[in-house]
Amino acid sequence: MPLNLDPESAAARDFAKRCVPEGESLDVGLLLSAFFHATDLNERVPELEPFFQKPEVCSDEVPREIPLSRALVSPVTDLAKNNADPITPVAFFSALLWSPPGMSFAAEKGVPEEALNRALATLRGEADTSEAGSPGKSANTTVEGWRIGWRGTERRKEALEELNPFGRMLTEGRPPQEKIIGMDEEIQALLKSLVKRKQRSALIIGLPGVGKTALVRELARRLMVGDPNIPTRMRDYDIFELSSNFLKAGTSLVGQYEERVNKLIKTLSENSKIILFVDEVHSLLQSGMHEKGNFTEANEAFKKALAQGDFSMIGATTTAEFRHYLEPDQALVQRFSIVSIQPPTPGEVLAIVEGRLPEIEGFYDVEIPAEILRKAVDLTEEYLPTRAQPRKAIQLLDEACAYCVTRTPPLEEVTEGVLWESLEDTVGHELLREETLTQGGLFGALSRKIVGQDEALEGICRAFISGLGGWVTERDHPRGVFLFGGPTGVGKTETALLLAKELGGGREALVRVDCNTLQPSGGDSGHALNVLLGPAPGYIGYVRGKGGLLSRIREHPESIVLFDEIEKADPGVGELLLQILDSGRCEDNDGNLLDFRRAFIVFTTNAGVVYDAPKTIGFLKAAELEGPRADVEKLKAEIRRKGLGEEFLGRISHYFIFGGLSPDAVTAILETQLEKLQDTAELRGYELEWGQGVVGHLVSQWQPRFGVRHLLAILRNRIVEQLSVADAQGELDGVGRIRLTVADEGKEETPAGTAIRERKGDTLVIGLG
């Protein structure tokens, strides 16, 4: 449909067409500038002249056809539809400048808001005066038609004044320059929800940080700039952002809150072109079944008005909050169309952060190389699995830039080292990297504490280092699934604890499950699953946000997950374990995602151990001991008999068998423990020494089937207990030396397994029986 322009406007249009470079389209800025300089508009509103540069002529003749830019299509089309009479330059210019593309252009040029409003008021007044005498003609058909529309009405101003105490209009003022990248599908889904004849409300749900609020603000931006993909009926809609805190702030009485809610409902119901947006909507719409309070009745009135379709609303909340507060109330949920936002792919995240790059670099005055952007995305995907993109990548870049500007002297560029430092600050501890730990270094750290298990430790170190490697491009399972088998007290659990300290950079990164707490109870596996995942909402023991033992993986995604003595667990947990071992993920009973892909899963078991030592009366000498040993096939048979099954055993990537302790290993452990006790005595001001036969004597009293625990019990009962009693009774007063000896055999006063104390000058002698 052609524009009905008066001669002066037609001349200005032709001037604009002559200024369009060959092969390009006519945009809103060029058209406005052409009208401003080809007519007397520069005299009527001279305050705008600095912002509208006179265009340069590119063609001596007026081109027959010039394509319009996409932003110009909508306002020009509506001008042609809504103006039967010729359009004057004043009416055309003011309408185009008032349109969303015109407002966006003015914002880009830096036109002060006060100057813009004053110029528009001047032009609007002149248009109304010049056309007031035209018979049968309303000023609304020229200046106050679509070109100004709802947003130019007095009623909108009144509604804005009524709503201002409760929030802010997202479609008021200048449109933001920042454009959200990669959310076109979600925008279309949101628009489809809002243009319906009934149920014109939408609920946006997704993980924290995926861009729920950003989606609504991007819709508001597109409404302001006149995006051609916005349906015609919605182009002059407003979005008003409300916080439920604004409603309740300052309301000391229940009646005051109800009055505010009723006022809000009345304003929204009377102005159908205002879409209400409520972030954290569960705080306003939570069902009375969760908690009843002073504000519950007013909130129910709000929900009732929403159900009747009195106004349109967009709500945003996290997946967990939706499930807890809103989903149980199906009558409420059915009033909304659900728009679910999934985290973007790494490629999409990279495009998003590239779009934010000028803004970030400009704010910090720090350079961020392209390879650092890719590294930031990769590191956050790898080390922050429980957080959502794109927020976590953008936050890491912010952290890295802040690190640069706070150095002395400031750093001019974000490097990979800075990125690692910032990531470690984010997670709260040093991160273990493949290049910082070798197989030999790890073996040395473990073998200093775990004695007599070199063969098992070598295999564990090799598998652990392999799990840290970067050869796995897509990780959809834990880093490693290990089973430590062998007799009790030989170092299986201690090895897992030492690995946890290595993984946590010195801190114990451990999620420990004592499988004694998962034992069967009356044939029902519910108790065991509740221990792991937490009780379901509504059941005894449920605490929102707490979860179960496995929920700790959210705080420590890079950790050792230890299932100690797995053979004692209820077989009913097998399906859950299979899910974790297969996909590396599961959900707790609070709906939280538990991600184990950065973790190592370690099972320990005493199953399948064979004890071959002959039955005797008394104690065997160390040289006569034949320690217990584990048989792999018997171990597997015992696990199957307990009910975990072949599918569980088949998902264990490595079996490591710890052997029974040899006399040499036991001797080394005991000597180490005595040296520690010697250090403790020195700190208390005593010299501790022992005779040559003491170690052999204590080893001879050790029972192989009980492992190191029995050895430590012997040390505690024979020596530490004697020292504690002597100290309590004042026997150490004036003592400078403590000597351990073996009591003479055959003395009745020193039965086997006991000890006697004797003072000799400044020396306390403890004779071990």
Image: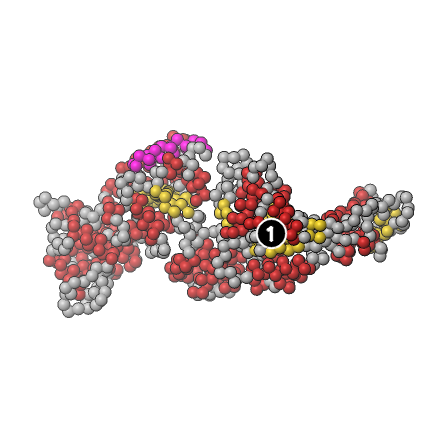
Q: Position of residue 419 (x, y in %)?
A: 50, 61
Residue 131 as seen in the image, left or right of residue 418:
left
- Callout 1: 10 Å neighbours few (<14), some, many (20+)? many
Q: Residue at x 56, y 43 (%)?
A: 573
What amino acid does circle 1 point to?
Val
Q: Main secondary structure of the magenta part?
A: helix
Q: Secondary structure at mark 1?
A: strand
Q: Position of residue 552 (x, y in %)?
A: 55, 47
Q: How many marks?
A: 1
Q: Is 352 one of the magenta-colored residues? A: no
The picture quadrant where one finds residue 353 is bottom left
Residue 536 as seen in the image, left or right of residue 103:
right
Q: Is 293 one of the magenta-colored residues? A: yes
> Is residue 467 in sight in this rendering?
yes
The picture quadrant where one finds residue 362 is bottom left
Q: Position of residue 174 (x, y in %)?
A: 30, 52
Q: Position of residue 26 (x, y in %)?
A: 21, 61
In front of the other: 340 or 229: 340
> Is residue 719 in sight in this rendering?
no
Residue 240 as seen in the image, left or right of residue 525:
left
Q: Residue furthest right?
A: 747
What residue sits right under mark 1 in the picture?
Answer: 602
Q: Residue at x 16, y 63 (%)?
A: 65
Quarter containing the N terminus? bottom left
Q: Residue furthest left?
A: 135
Q: Residue at x 61, y 40 (%)?
A: 519
In front of the other: 440 or 276: 440
What residue span does the magenta drawing correspond to? 291-310
Q: Residue at x 66, y 58 (%)?
A: 456
In front of the other: 31 or 482: 482
